[in-house]
Image: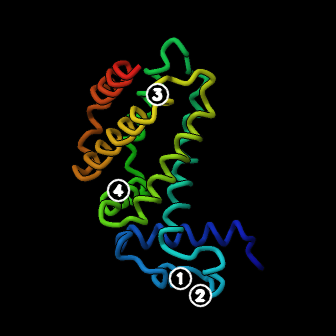
Amino acid sequence: MRKSKAQRQEEILNAAQKVFLKKGFVNTTMEDVIAETSLSKGGFYHYFKSTNDILYELMAKGIQQRNEKIEEKLDQLDYDHLNDFIAHRITEKILDNNDKSKIYVEFLLAKKEDLKLEELYKRLQKKTKEEILKYFRRIPEYLKDQKKSIFICEYVNSLIIGNRLLEGGFSANYEIIRKNIKNILDDLS
């Protein structure tokens, strides 16, 4: 039975995630990923041209999954306490130790040495911001301000890296992290 285009892409992304976790993103070649799929080399390249392309799609799926979690909690959103709602969602993201988070941390660490990864990072930042803004009828000023939104993103990423490198050591301190994030959002408002 032939797989649909979506099924093949999903197969590739699952294979890539498996290899990225095993070998590390920077050490993974296209041949490594192809070997984990049922596709021929030509068929594979029909979907993705590089590991960076695959990484972008994996991270975009992560953004989508994160936004689905936000959407599930929108019924809890009180615009008088918007920063608190956002602080909770950010804290959940920081403490989420899923497989995509592991790959994301490696990507963040590797982008310093690779201009193509830096460009990919900027595309992901833009996508994240566009997606998250869809959920709020009243958008906080700090999300509209380029410098403030970049600061928030970089601050959150530093905590994601710290949590991952310290093997989830932040998990027991959810409330402290949430309060810290909320204070920062309040200061930026």
- Residue 91 position in % (x across, y down): 38, 34
**Residue 188, image x, y percentages:** 37, 23
- In 3D space, how far apart are the residues under numbered discs 4 and 3 (Cα atoms)? 22 Å
Q: Are marks 4 and 1 in contact (CB under 8 Å)?
A: no
Q: Amino acid at mark 3?
A: Ile
Q: Secondary structure at mark 4?
A: helix
**Label 1 is placed on what type of residue?**
Ile
Q: Quadrant of the C terminus?
A: top left
Q: Position of residue 114 (x, y in %)?
A: 35, 66
Q: Nearer the viewer, residue 38 or 144?
A: 144
Sequence order check, earlier mark of 2 and 1: 1
Mark carried by residue 59? none
Name the residue nearer the viewer: 136 or 145: 145
In this view, the residue in front, 72 or 188, is 188
Q: Residue at 58% of width from left, 47% of height from top?
A: 64
Where residue 101 sits in the image (x, y, percent)?
40, 53
- N-terminal label among 4 and 2: 2
User: Residue farthest to the right?
Assistant: 1
| Amino acid of disc 4 | Leu
Characterize the local packing of mark 1: few (<14), some (14-19) or many (20 or more) Cα atoms within 10 angstroms: some
> Which residue sits at x=64%, y=69%?
9
Q: What residue did someone put label 1 on?
A: 34
Q: What amino acid does circle 2 point to?
A: Lys
Residue that numbered label 2 is attached to: 41
Between label 4 and label 1, give the one nearer the viewer: 4
Rendered position, 76 above or below 15: above
The residue carrying mark 4 is: 108
Q: Pointer 3: what residue?
A: 86
- Image quarter of residue 150: top left
- Is the residue 16 above or below the residue 176 in the image? below
